[in-house]
Image (tube, rainbow, N blue to C red):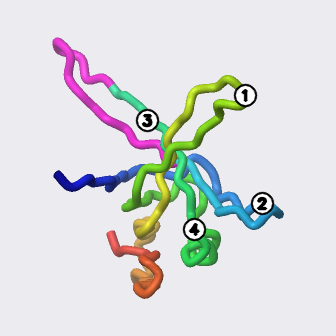
């Protein structure tokens, strides 16, 4: 059996994209993805917060476009971070391979598309 490690997440940025730290690490951002479901006669909302790591080829475009509240679609892979030295459990992050920011709502502007297809891609999608 082949292993598959692929993630697709859609949601909104919790805050602006964080630039890389001085040690040259990846940039990152957090996405909140809402799930609505019905229980009895109530409609309930479940929020899921996911940390996204942005590798070097995508950082510049994500920093320029990725602002708090902006809707985003991320395709990537899971990566486990091990904090065994501090006694904490390992946790998962998503390493972005493709990032698509949804067009900001405006009644008078044309969609702007920015692509970096050679590097896995960052684009601004219309609507």
Disc 2 element:
loop
- Which residue position holds label 3? 48
Q: Quadrant of residue 17?
A: bottom right
Question: At 42% from the left edge and 32% from the top edge, which residue is drawn?
Answer: 47
Q: Position of residue 119 (x, y in %)?
A: 47, 81
Q: Is residue 43 left or right of residue 126?
A: left
- Which residue position holds label 2? 21
Pointer 2 or 4: first along the chain: 2
Span colored in magenta: 31-44
Q: Is residue 77 left or right of residue 40?
A: right
Pointer 2 or 3: first along the chain: 2
Q: From mark 2 to mark 4, how far is it between C-alphas? A: 12 Å
Q: Quadrant of residue 73?
A: bottom left
Judge depth for marks 2 and 1 and give the one in front.
1
Q: Are marks 3 and 1 in contact (CB under 8 Å)?
A: no
Pointer 4 or 3: first along the chain: 3
Density class for disc 3 (Cα within 10 Å; few <14, some 14-19, many ≥20) is few
Disc 4 element:
loop
Q: From mark 3 to mark 1, how far is it between C-alphas? A: 25 Å
Pointer 3 or 1: first along the chain: 3
Q: From mark 1 to mark 4, how far is it between C-alphas? A: 26 Å
Q: Residue furthest top?
A: 40
Disc 3 element:
strand
Q: From mark 2 to mark 1, how far is it between C-alphas? A: 21 Å
Question: At 28% from the left edge and 32% from the top edge, which residue is drawn?
Answer: 36
- Which residue position holds label 1? 86
């Amino acid at each position: 059996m082949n292993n598959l490690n692929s993630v697709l997440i859609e949601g909104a940025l919790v805050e602006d994209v964080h630039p890389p730290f001085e040690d040259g690490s990846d940039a990152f951002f957090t996405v909140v993805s809402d799930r609505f479901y019905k229980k009895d006669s109530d409609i309930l909302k479940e929020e899921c917060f996911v940390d996204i790591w942005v590798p070097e080829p995508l950082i510049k475009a994500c920093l320029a476009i990725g602002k708090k509240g902006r809707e985003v679609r991320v395709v990537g892979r899971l990566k486990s971070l091990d904090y065994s030295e501090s006694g904490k459990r390992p946790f998962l992050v998503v390493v972005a391979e493709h990032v698509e920011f949804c067009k900001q709502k405006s009644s008078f502007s044309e969609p702007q598309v920015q692509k970096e297809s050679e590097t896995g891609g960052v684009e601004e999608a219309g609507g």
